[in-house]
Image: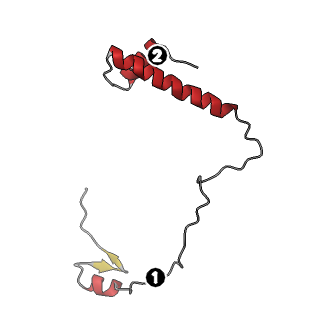
Amino acid sequence: MSLSLDDVRRIAKLARIAVTDTELAATQQQLNKIFTLIEEMRAVDTTGIAPMAHAQDVHLRLRDDAATAPNRREAFQAIAPAVENGLYLVPKVIE
C-alpha cells in the first residue's frame, strides 16, 4: 500500500497539521516507508509463536503486600467535625 500526495494532504487536513508542498513529499516518503515495513512484518509467519509482553525476559521483583503504616483512623476522626459509623459526614452541596 502506498499513499498518494492527495492522501497525505487529506491526512494532514484531518489531523489539522499545516504541511507545505516540500514537507508533503517528504512526509509521503516517510509514510510509504512505514507502510512497506508493516507489510514486511505482516509477511512473516508467526504461527506457533507465543505473544510476548516485553522484548526481554524481565521479571519484576515483588514484595509481600503488607500494611506498614499504623492504623490512625480513630486519631484522624477524633478531630473531624462530624463522624458517624466510622465515616466522615460532609454538608450537602447540591440540592
Q: Secondary structure at mark 1?
A: loop
Q: Amino acid at mark 2?
A: Asp
Q: Which is in the foreground here, disc 2 or disc 1?
A: 2
Residue at x 38%, y 18% (from the top left corner): 24
Disc 2: which residue: 7
Q: Is the C terminus in the top left, top right, bottom left or bottom right quadrant?
A: bottom left
Q: CA distance from mark 2 to mark 1?
A: 57 Å
**x and y percentages locating residue 75 in the rendered image:** 29, 87
Name the quadrant containing residue 23. Answer: top left
| Left or right side of 87 for 53 | right
How many numbered marks are there?
A: 2
Find residue 67 and name its label.
1
Crowding near pointer 2: few (<14 within 10 Å), some, many (20+)?
few
Q: Secondary structure at mark 2?
A: helix
Find residue 45 and name its label.
none
Image height of 12 relative to 80, above or below: above
Q: Amino acid at mark 1?
A: Ala
Task: Say if mark 2 contacts mark 1, CB within 8 Å.
Answer: no
Crowding near pointer 1: few (<14 within 10 Å), some, many (20+)?
few
**x and y percentages locating residue 38 in the rendered image:** 59, 31
Which residue extends farthest right? 48
Residue at x 24%, y 80% (from the top left corner): 80
| Left or right side of 81 for 11 | right
Q: Earlier in the sequence, mark 2 or mark 1?
A: 2
Q: Nearer the viewer, residue 93 or 79?
A: 79
Residue at x 48%, y 25% (from the top left corner): 31
Residue at x 71%, y 50% (from the top left corner): 50
**x and y percentages locating residue 8 in the rendered image:** 43, 18
Q: Is the N terminus in the top left, top right, bottom left or bottom right quadrant?
A: top right
Q: Nearer the viewer, residue 89 or 52?
A: 52
